[in-house]
């Protein structure tokens, strides 16, 4: 049974954006950790062959964003799009050939990430409008106020098999444990706004820790990480996060990790489950 929350008190509100055109900074090259300039696709647009449930590593791409990336051209409206949208929210195409098709929010990067089925993707065009039924800002557990929820919809929190251990602790399934020392770019950002990247340049370490097997949409845990106000090291704290974009060739960057819940004391335990992925929890697609 899902943990009791204040879901009935939440406001559902519409926010909207449009499918973004991929862009490249002139002259297009990104330096890798060996100083070699690379020109790679990854962010924005409609990505046809990378979805939640697929590998986070191994793409000939940089920061690949699975599915459809949307933003709003108005800065204030885009700010609201980021802060009000939560993972698991419904998304509806409101213009173009796929008008009326529904998808689901799966991540937040420089843009909001939405998964649609392959048949819908074939009809989508850059510039098509996507409306999101935003719900989840202010979500909290009734019996575990020490656990702060971020960017997570009731739809998702009710789907994750979270176990209540007692009045102080909960247990969450995750695929991977991420040591705080490998967390990179994004530590300076609010945990309600955009992700934090892994530092994945040490491939031997990634393989040793099993991180190179991580998939887009995986739930992960970062021990000793307090993400209540930004992202900082705190002994005993725990943060649960979501892998939302793919690997990067850039120094200090790698797969992106979006905070879902955090606690400054040891009140979140975890259990390893290789199937702990939102593709499964939100019935987006079959897991291989």
Image (tube, rainbow, N blue to C red):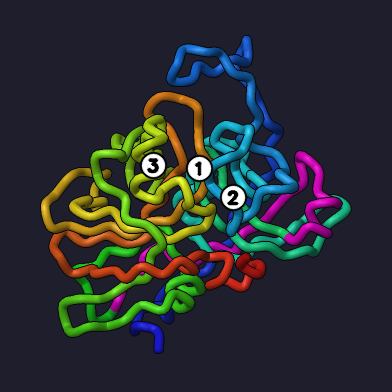
Tell me the element at label 1: loop
Q: Is residue 120 above or below residue 165?
A: above
- Magenta part, dominant SS: loop
- Which of label 3 and label 1 is nearer to you? 3
Q: Nearer the viewer, residue 240 or 88?
A: 240
Disc on res. 109: 1
Q: Answer yes or no: do the residues labelled 2 and 1 have beta carbons within 8 Å?
A: yes
Q: Which residue is mark 2?
A: 113
The location of residue 166, given as percent across then percent down, is: 18, 84
The location of residue 89, given as percent across then percent down, is: 56, 65
Q: Residue at the spot x=18%, y=69% of the render? A: 267
Tell me the element at label 3: helix
Mark 2 / mark 3, whichever is N-terminal: 2
- Cα separation, mark 3 vs mark 1, equals 22 Å
The location of residue 248, given as percent across then percent down, is: 50, 32
Please tell me whether residue 103 belongs to the stretch shown in magenta: no
Q: Is residue 97 above or below residue 136?
A: above
Query: The N terminus lies in which quarter of the figure?
Result: bottom left
Query: The C terminus lies in which quarter of the figure?
Result: bottom right
Q: Nearer the viewer, residue 105 or 60?
A: 60
The location of residue 28, given as percent across then percent down, is: 62, 15
Q: Which residue is mark 3?
A: 206
Note whether residue 201 is visible.
yes
In the picture, residue 185 is in which quadrant?
top left
181 horizontally vs 47: left or right: left
Q: Answer yes or no: do the residues labelled 2 and 3 have beta carbons within 8 Å?
A: no
Pointer 2 local density, CA inside 10 Å: few below 14, some 14–19, many at least 20: many
């Amino acid at each position: 049974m899902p943990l009791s929350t204040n879901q009935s008190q939440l406001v559902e509100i519409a926010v909207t954006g449009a499918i973004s055109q991929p862009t490249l900074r002139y002259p297009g090259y990104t330096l890798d950790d060996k100083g070699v300039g690379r020109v790679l696709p990854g962010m924005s647009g409609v990505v046809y062959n990378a979805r939640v449930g697929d590998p986070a590593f191994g793409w000939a791409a940089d920061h690949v964003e699975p599915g459809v990336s949307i933003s709003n051209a108005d800065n204030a409206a885009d700010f609201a799009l980021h802060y009000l949208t939560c993972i698991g929210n419904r998304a509806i195409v409101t213009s173009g050939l796929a008008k009326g098709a529904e998808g689901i929010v799966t991540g937040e990067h420089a843009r909001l990430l939405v998964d649609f089925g392959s048949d819908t993707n074939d009809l989508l065009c850059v510039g098509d409008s996507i409306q999101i039924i935003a719900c989840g800002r202010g979500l909290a557990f009734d019996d575990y106020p020490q656990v702060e929820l971020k960017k997570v919809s009731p739809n998702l929190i009710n789907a994750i098999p979270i176990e209540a251990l007692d009045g102080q602790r909960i247990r969450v399934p995750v695929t991977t444990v991420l040591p705080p020392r490998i967390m990179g770019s994004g530590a300076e950002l609010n945990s309600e706004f955009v992700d934090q990247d892994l530092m994945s340049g040490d491939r031997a370490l990634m393989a040793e820790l099993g991180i190179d097997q991580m998939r887009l949409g995986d739930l992960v845990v970062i021990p000793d990480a307090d993400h209540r106000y930004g992202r900082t090291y705190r002994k005993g704290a725990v943060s649960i996060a979501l892998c939302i974009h793919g690997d990067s060739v850039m120094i200090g960057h790698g797969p992106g990790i979006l905070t879902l819940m955090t606690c400054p004391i040891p009140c979140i335990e975890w259990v390893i489950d290789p199937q702990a992925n939102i593709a499964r929890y939100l019935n987006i697609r079959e897991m291989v």
